[in-house]
Amino acid sequence: MDWFTAPDYWLSRLVFQRALAAVYLVAFLTAALQFRALLGERGMLPIPRYLARARFRRAPSLFHLHYSDRFFAACAWTGCAVSAALLAGADSLLPLWAGILLWLVPWALYLSIVNVGQTWYAFGWESLLLETGFLAAFLGNGEVAPPVVVLFLLRWILFRVEFGAGLIKMRGDACWRRLTCLDYHHETQPMPGPLSWFFHHLPKPLHRVEVAANHVTQLVVPVLLFTPQPIASAAAALMIATQLWLVLSGNFSWLNWITIVLALSALRLPATAPPVPPAPLWYEVLVLAVGALLLFLSHRPVVNMVSRRQVMNRSFDPLHLVNTYGAFGSVSRVRYEVVIEGTLDDTPRPDSDWREYVFKGKPGDPHRWPRQFAPYHLRLDWLMWFAALSPAYAGEWFGGLVERLLENDRDTLRLLRRSPFPPGTPPRHVRARLFRYRYTTWRELRETGACWERTFVREYLPPTRLAGVAHRS
């Protein structure tokens, strides 16, 4: 079938596949380095406890067959190794069928992690990586030209990511319609980056232009992905530019980067296509069958997008093959942060020597400037932002975090930038307090060197100690 492949997109496929492998590598590295404290056998939300009540049919995962921290680590580091091999082009050295299987390995491993990841993995970019990764497995290697069906479905994912995000904004917070959301967003976003302070202090008229441009990019430009070239490439390039702007403005894990990766598949990069034989019949049948399945499963995301009760970031099947996306349907006007402190005093008092735990990414010390972590994902820091919005968001895991801080748990402390207590000297009590944070003005920054100003709001968790621990004499 002459129409089945698009030889002009062979370089686009190559760039897309290598970029996707890089995102996979970051995702597996994040899992390998953080899972013990979050999900391990002694973690805040232990996987064994979750597996005791979760059925394989609803959450398919290798860990239903066996779980141990050592086995999880082996899966995560295997995912890193396979991703690195794909990044280096290992799939191009294999037969077509073997290349497909190799691409399905990281998808299956990461699906196993996401489906037992609970709250720590309840983010839209997890499903987006899985949906993109599954489809990428059928994009082929140097033995065939890129299949048109797969290229179309990659654009279909990108369309749903951007258009769904645009719709949820227009239907959600009124500040998107009034073009005022960026008056608050850079200050109240989950994890600001090193340039977020400067983005916040841009002139308000420019913020209005940014919001209007965002609406165009998310509600108009996605439709152009399905037009002839070079218009489709121009639309994809505009999306890439917008995502890079977002990369500069904050830490959003790999959400921006996986969106850029998807947009790369829509670019027709100028290059002479190498000669390849026609696609084998079995490959054509396989790709068409996968395409038909994904189009059939797309009806639920479509219904969700057109619904007045549109929801964000939901998977409609346990394999995360087709999902719905969206971000920042509402924008907080005020930033709150939970500050966790410990003391060595047996009897805690307001004037005790309370020492603050320092997180890697979330705001703490007003003088400490935010750092760039994305595409690496600091899962605990992100969930601390939700905890500040409401204790209900932290009900499952916050008590476990406090308990492990009282134990000076090594794996938990590795999630932090710094503990105020040396090894072997755990705190006697831990407390949490809620503060309101706001960016300083230019004048305050010059005078104090602080990028934040914080004000005590209320007690979040009273001084707590481990049960059964006796007072020291």
Image (spheres, grey):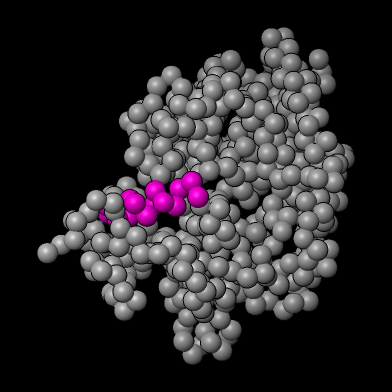
The residue lying toward the viewer, choosing from 387 and 244, is: 387
Relative depth, front residue between 286 and 121: 121
Q: Position of residue 289 (x, y in %)?
A: 74, 16
* Image side of residue 176 versus residue 363, left or right: right
Above or below 30: residue 172: below
> Is 355 located above or below residue 102 in the figure?
below
Q: Residue at x 66, y 47 (%)?
A: 260
Could you tell me which quadrant the N terminus lies in? top right
Percent x, y of residue 64: 46, 22
Question: Quick check: 86 left or right of 129?
Answer: left
Residue at 58% x, 61% y: name it.
389
| Residue 275 in sight from this viewpoint | no
Seen at 44% across and 52% down, the residue is 398
Question: Residue placed farthest to the left in the image?
Answer: 473
Q: Split into 4 quadrants, where in the image is the C terminus?
A: bottom left
Nearer-the-camera pick, 152 or 207: 207
- x%, y% of residue 438? 57, 76
Q: Is residue 164 left or right of residue 101?
A: right
Dividing the picture into quadrants, the one containing residue 347 is bottom left
Q: Residue at x 55, y 52 (%)?
A: 393
Q: Residue furthest top?
A: 281
Of the pair 14 and 305, the residue shown nearer to us = 305
Q: Is residue 463 magenta?
A: no
Which quadrant would residue 122 be assigned to in this image? top right
Q: Position of residue 437 (x, y in %)?
A: 54, 73
Which region is colored magenta?
395-408
Q: Is residue 277 visible?
A: yes
- Majority secondary structure of the magenta segment? helix
